[in-house]
Image: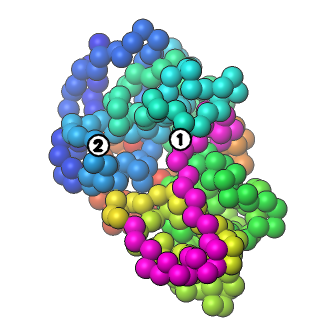
Amino acid sequence: MVEVLAAVLREFGSEFSVERVRLERPSDDWVLVNVKAVGICGRDVVVWRGGFANLKPPLILGHEVFGEHEGRPVGVYPGVVGRECMAPDGSFSVASCSSYTILGEGPPGGYSTAVWAPSWNLVDLPDEEYAKYAAAVCGVATYMHASRLAGVEPGSRVLVVGASGGVGIHGAQYLRSLGAEVLGFTRSAEKAEALRRVGVKPVLDPLGYRSLGRVDVVFENVGASTINWSMRWLKPGGTLVLIGNVEGKPITIERPAYLVMREIRIVGSAAYDMREYREAVKLVGEGAIRPFYRAYRLTEVNRAYRDIVEGRVVGRAVLVPG
C-alpha cells in the first residue's frame, strides 16, 4: 500500500479531481515507480470523453510513464501482459494475447506521484530527461509498429493526418528516418512551421492531393472526422493505417465503391510491443527524434486538457510533479 497524489477521473467529460489516494500493490512481482513525467496521450482524451464503453470511473489515467525505481531512471512499458504472452526478445501479438490491458485502464496509471508496475515492464533510460521520453517514445514506438504493418520502405510517399499531435509529430520523424517522403496534415500555420523544422512537408488543405499528388500510405491519427478524405489521398492499391479515433465517434465509410474500386487496404494498428518500446527509448535518448511538448504540473491537469482540446499544444502535453 502506498499513498500518492493523483488526478482522478470521477466522471467522463468532467474535470479531474486532484486528491490523495491509496494504491494497493497488485502482486509481489510489481514494483513502485516514482513518476517524474507522464504524457497525456490522445487515447487518454478518448477515455476522458467516455469513448471506451468497457471503462468505468473512477480512473487514474496515464500510460506514458517515466520516472525512478530505487533511484534508477526507467520507462514503464504500458502494456500489462503476462510473461507467457511475451517472447524472449520482448515481442508479442496484441491481437493474440487475451490478458492485454494498459496502465490507466486497468491498473492505476501515471497521473500520480507514483505507480505500481510489473517488474518486467521496466526499461532503463540513458539519462534523466524524463519529459522528452514522455513526449516522444509513445509516438515513435507506435509508428515503428504501424510502419511495419504498412510496409514503409525508403522512397515510400506517406501522409500523416494529425501530424502536429504527440503521436504524429514524433512518428513522422521516425518515418523520415526510414527514408520515406513525409507529408503532414495540420490545420494551423504555427504547427505547420513545427513540421517544417523536422523535415516534414506541411499540408493544410484536405484536398491537397490535387496539386501535390497521391501517396502510398496514409497514417490516420484522427479517425472519424478525417478518414473519408484521407482515403482520397491514396494511390490505387494504397494502404490506410488507422492508429487513432480521437473523438471516439463511430467511423462511417461514405463511399464504399471508392474503397472497392481502388482496392484500398485499411489496416488497424493496435499497439507496440516491448521490443519496439526499447528501440524507441534508444532513438529518443540518442537525439535522433526531436521532442515537442508543453509541460504542466500534475495539479494543472485540467488546464492541460483544455489546451489539448482547444488545439493549443504542439506535440505532447506532459505532466510533471508539482
Element type where label 1 sits in the image = helix
- Which range of residues does the magenta coloring cover? 251-280
Relative side of 272 to 320, left or right = right
Q: Amino acid at mark 1?
A: Ala
Mark 1, mark 2: which one is toward the viewer?
A: 1
Q: Which residue is mark 1?
A: 95
Pick whichever of labels 1 and 2 is earlier in the sequence.
2
- Lateral position of residue 43 relative to residue 169, left or right: left
Residue 69 in the image: state x and y as whole percent.
50, 19
> Which quarter of the image is occupied by the N terminus?
top left
For label 2, the SS is: loop
Residue at the spot x=36%, y=16% of the render? 26
Q: Amino acid at mark 2?
A: Asn
Residue with the most extreme bottom position? 211
Name above or below for residue 90 compared with residue 311.
above
Disc marking residue 302? none
| Separation (CA) of disc 1 from disc 2 | 17 Å
Q: Is residue 182 magenta?
A: no
Query: Where residue 296 sits: x, y (%)?
Result: 37, 47
Examine the rendering and report whether any part of residue 154 can be seen: yes
Q: Pointers 1 and 2 in contact (CB under 8 A)?
A: no
Q: Where in the figure is residue 29, as x and y percent of width and height?
A: 47, 11
Q: Residue at x 66, y 49 (%)?
A: 144
Q: Which one is nearer the viewer's eye here, 71 or 42?
A: 42
Residue labelled with disc 2: 54
